[in-house]
């Protein structure tokens, strides 16, 4: 693809295409958008840039994360950068705030910066993500979501197995009416897989699934308040929340409304965030390997750059028992 071909497709002169590429000189808004769309659709690179790409790597890796305020995301980022540093790579860190459009924009920016690869800490994988990354042809490793079906490498936590084990733990403690606080299943790992683990554990224990014991929050502590009133009308003896933030929100609601934890209601979470160990009562939870998952993603990407081989790695977990559960 050449500038002349871009110009012909857009119905403009080569000088107009050049002004768009170099962001110099005046170009009408609608014309600029038309040219930019053709450039994006074709994956065109100026010849000088293309030559540079053939000559050498940039030793630069793009990292996409949803936020910086989370301890767990911080551990993942620490793990990634540790391995990149060991292999002589620098990183560009992009915080998206869970904004889909920003994720897409950063992928395009990383292409412009000629990164050698991308590590994407994902809460979802859409067809738009997949199509753009395949068009950009940048080696990419996803963390947290199973990208294998899209032929991308990934490092995932055993969300299903961990939640199933936690549910079985509550059953063994004598609990049969176990409430569940989940998140939107667009997040396949946390929303769908953890709910599936909960349901399968109950089914295998021959405990009937009560849909009224299953409710939704998001990733914020305060998000459970709206659903807890209805959930408590079903008088659960235990509540499993799919994140520690949600579990702390559950405990806050229960204490504000005169319940004792764990004497009246046991509560468990997942993630083993910093607050889980210092909250009162200290939270029984799942410890995922966040630091190690970042390290593994870095190593997987290094191997992709060396061999091109696609990999899927499933990380381990540990059930951490503390004081928020009582045996009936």
Image (cartoon, rainbow, N blue to C red):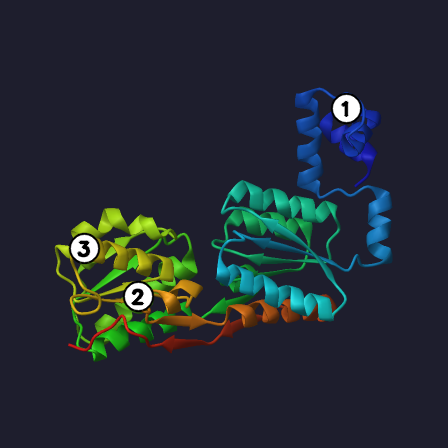
Decide: few, some or many residues near mark 1? Use Cα within 10 Å; few <14, some 14-19, many ≥20: some
CA distance for labels 3 and 1: 62 Å
Residue 12's label in the rendered image is 1
Nearer-the-camera pick, 318 or 249: 249
In the drawing, does residue 195 fall left or right of residue 266?
right
Judged by depth in the image, the label closer to the viewer, 1 or 2, is 2
Q: Which residue is mark 2?
A: 280
Question: Quick one: SS at disc 3?
Answer: helix
Give the image quarter of residue 117.
Answer: bottom right
Residue located at (36% from left, 51% from top):
218
Residue nearest the viewer, comparing 168 with 211: 168
For residue 41, side relative to residue 226 (left or right): right
Q: Position of residue 50 (x, y in %)?
A: 82, 48
Note whether residue 304 is visible. no
Looking at the rendered structure, the secondary structure element under dot 1 is loop
Labelled disc at residue 231? 3
Which quarter of the figure has residue 211?
bottom left
Left or right: where does residue 32 sit relative to residue 252?
A: right
State the image coordinates of residue 35 (x, y, percent, origin top left): 71, 30
On the question of residue 69 being in view, the answer is yes
Proximity of marks 3 and 1: CB atoms separated by less than 8 Å: no
């Amino acid at each position: 693809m050449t500038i002349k071909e871009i110009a012909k497709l857009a119905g403009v002169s080569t000088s107009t295409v050049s002004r768009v590429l170099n962001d110099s000189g005046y170009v009408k808004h609608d014309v600029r958008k038309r040219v930019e769309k053709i450039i994006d659709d074709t994956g065109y690179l100026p010849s000088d840039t293309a030559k540079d790409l053939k000559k050498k790597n940039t030793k630069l890796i793009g990292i996409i994360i949803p936020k910086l305020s989370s301890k767990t995301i911080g551990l993942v980022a620490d793990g990634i950068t540790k391995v990149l540093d060991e292999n002589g790579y620098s990183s560009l860190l992009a915080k998206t705030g869970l904004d889909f459009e920003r994720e897409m924009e950063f992928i395009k920016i990383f292409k412009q910066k000629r990164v050698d690869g991308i590590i994407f800490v994902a809460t979802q994988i859409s067809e738009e993500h997949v199509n753009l990354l395949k068009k950009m042809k940048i080696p990419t490793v996803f963390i947290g979501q199973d990208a294998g079906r899209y032929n991308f490498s990934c490092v995932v936590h055993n969300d299903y197995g961990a939640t199933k084990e936690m549910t079985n733990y509550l059953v063994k403690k004598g609990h049969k009416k176990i409430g569940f606080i989940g998140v939107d299943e667009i997040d396949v790992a946390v929303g769908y897989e953890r709910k599936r683990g909960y349901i399968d554990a109950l089914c295998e224990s021959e405990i009937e699934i009560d849909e009224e014991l299953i409710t939704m929050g998001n990733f914020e502590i305060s998000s459970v308040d709206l659903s807890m009133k209805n959930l408590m009308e079903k008088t659960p003896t235990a509540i499993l929340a799919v994140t520690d933030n949600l579990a702390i929100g559950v405990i806050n609601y229960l204490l504000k409304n005169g319940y004792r934890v764990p004497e009246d209601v046991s509560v468990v979470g997942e993630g083993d965030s910093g607050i889980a160990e210092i909250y009162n009562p200290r939270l029984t939870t799942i410890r995922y390997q966040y630091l190690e998952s970042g390290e593994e993603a870095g190593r997987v990407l290094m191997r992709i750059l060396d061999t091109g081989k696609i990999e899927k790695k499933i990380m381990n977990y540990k059930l951490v028992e503390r004081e928020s559960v009582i045996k009936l």
